[in-house]
Image: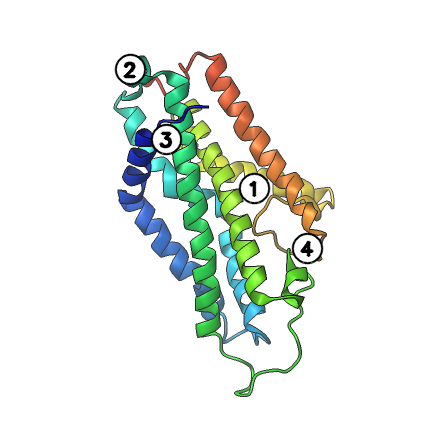
Amino acid sequence: MKIDIRLIHATVRTTVSYPSYWLTCLALIILWPGMAFFGQSSVAYDQWQQYYYDGSGFVGLFFPLFVTLLVQMPLLDEWSNTYFLPTRTRIGSWHYLRAKVFAVGLVAGATMALLVVLAFVLAKVTFKPVNPQGLLDPPDLSRYQFGQLWEKSALAYIVVFALWVGIVAASEAILAVVAAAIISNKLIAIAAPFLVLFVVNLIVQILGLEEFQLPPLRTNITQQPMWMELPGWFFIMLLGCLGLWQIRKSNYSTPGLVRS
């Protein structure tokens, strides 16, 4: 399968040069540990790991929106200027769209994985124990995904979890591309991936199936086998693939790609 490396490189460079990309990164750097840091006066955190997770709850709630803001703005601007119309005749519609999907997935995955590592570091640095000596008891991480790895190595946990967040972010980026290509209204295209997560998580909670919340930052669940992360990810990938199939089926003439 041939992929245009130059187009991917150009898309990555354009994406990371957008103000929306850097503003979203800055917001996540502040919010991820900040939500726990500013709540320290009312919550006595026993361990810095628990402190990190409580801070990640807000980010998990809006995770698809943050991913969308990282990568979707250049696509919306590019397709608003009808850039796609002459480009499709020059390099081919599927060739072009495939390169865009690969590029934004790479940017979203790498960025969110690095931000997870940074959030752990900031949580460790800003954590204030209940007493100056800290607590000797091991952290109770029984309600967090991948918590089994803490018993083996904190470093192994952080690496595996960061990679998983990056994989899910790349999948969410595919939804961001699909939303931008299918939906002509920019605000709805931006909100669509978040609305999918919100509706799905609401339904599974009503049904009492919290273990099937969409990844990666699932909250208020007991510790699950690590493979339980996969059903939600498969669902995200299925939506992305169905969206790409719909775009191809419409001969790349969806409202988002061919704007008036």
Say which amino acid is labelled 3.
Lys
Q: Is residue 238 above or below residue 12?
A: above
Residue at image coords 57%, 83%? 134
Say which amino acid is labelled 4.
Ile
Per the image, the residue denoted by label 3 is 186
Distance, label 4 to label 2, CA atoms, is: 50 Å
Return the mark for residue 258: none
Say which amino acid is labelled 2.
Arg
**Looking at the image, is mark 2 or mark 3 nearer the viewer?**
2
Residue 260 in view, yes or no: no
Which type of secondary structure does the marked residue at label 1 adopt?
helix
| Left or right position of 69 against 117 | left
Q: Of marks 2 and 3, which one's residue comes earlier in the chain?
A: 2
Q: Of marks 1 and 3, which one's residue comes earlier in the chain?
A: 3
* Residue 207 position within the rendered picture, expressed as x and y whole percent measured from the top left: 73, 42
Distance, label 4 to label 3, CA atoms, is: 34 Å
Which type of secondary structure does the marked residue at label 3 adopt?
helix
Per the image, the residue denoted by label 1 is 198
Distance, label 4 to label 1, CA atoms, is: 16 Å
Per the image, the residue denoted by label 2 is 90
Per the image, the residue denoted by label 4 is 221
Snapshot quadrant of residue 242: top right
Q: Of marks 4 and 1, which one's residue comes earlier in the chain?
A: 1
Number of residues whose C-alpha sits closer than 10 Å to that of mark 4, classed few (under 14), some (14–19) or many (20 or more): some
Say which amino acid is labelled 1.
Phe
Q: Is residue 214 above or below residue 84?
A: below
Disc 1 to disc 3: CB gap under 8 Å: no
The front one of 7 and 48 is 7
